[in-house]
Image (cartoon, rainbow, N blue to C red):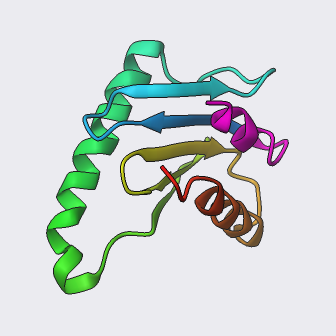
């Protein structure tokens, strides 16, 4: 899979991209060249496990509210986006200074790129 590389190359302000299985195991991940991780490898793995658990928890409300299209978390140091294709979860981070319009454009591009997962 070169998918994470294609995702990270979408914009210079992208930081990290990962494909995660439903159990939270990182299948493929890449940090943007020149960027340093804000979390240790162990923390990154733990975070991805939490992403999978939260996906499972959100599915509880799919019948009444519809399925989740994506999750956007805005933090002081980073923007986190989680997208839910069928079989995997896509987790990306980007610089928080980016405009919301640009972030939404990236979300839509990533959703199209990962629709087959």
Q: Nearer the viewer, residue 39 or 25?
A: 25
Q: Nearer the viewer, residue 9 or 32?
A: 9
Q: Residue furthest bottom?
A: 64
Image coords of residue 34 (percent x, y): 81, 20
Residue under the image location 66 percent in, 25 percent down = 31
Does the stretch in magenta take in 80?
A: no
Residue 86: image quadrant is bottom left
Image coords of residue 55 (percent x, y): 28, 53
Above-or-below relation of 60 to 15: below
Left or right, 65 with reference to 104: left
Q: Residue furthest right?
A: 12
Residue 60: image quadrant is bottom left
- Report the quarter where the N terminus lies: top right
Residue under the image location 77 percent in, 65 percent down = 102
Does the stretch in magenta take in 7?
A: yes
Residue under the image location 68 percent in, 20 percent down = 36
Q: Nearer the viewer, residue 40 or 49?
A: 49
Q: Residue furthest top?
A: 41
Q: Which residues are magenta?
A: 1-14
Above-or-below relation of 81 to 69: above
Image coords of residue 111 (percent x, y): 59, 61
Residue under the image location 85 percent in, 42 percent down = 12
Left or right, 59 with reference to 10: left
Q: Residue furthest front?
A: 116
Left or right, 98 with reference to 117: right
Image coords of residue 96 (percent x, y): 68, 51
Residue 109: image quadrant is bottom right
Q: Give the number of callouts.
A: 0
């Amino acid at each position: 899979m070169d998918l994470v590389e294609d995702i990270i190359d979408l914009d210079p302000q992208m930081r990290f991209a990962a494909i995660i299985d439903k159990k939270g195991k990182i299948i493929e991940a890449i940090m943007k060249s020149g960027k340093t991780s804000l979390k240790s490898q162990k923390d990154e793995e733990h975070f991805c496990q939490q992403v999978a658990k939260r996906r499972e928890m959100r599915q509880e409300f799919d019948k009444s509210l519809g399925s989740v299209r994506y999750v956007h978390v805005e933090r002081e140091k980073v923007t986190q986006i989680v997208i839910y294709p069928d079989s995997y979860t896509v987790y990306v981070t980007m610089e928080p200074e980016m405009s919301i319009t640009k972030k939404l454009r990236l979300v839509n591009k990533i959703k199209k790129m990962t629709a087959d997962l």
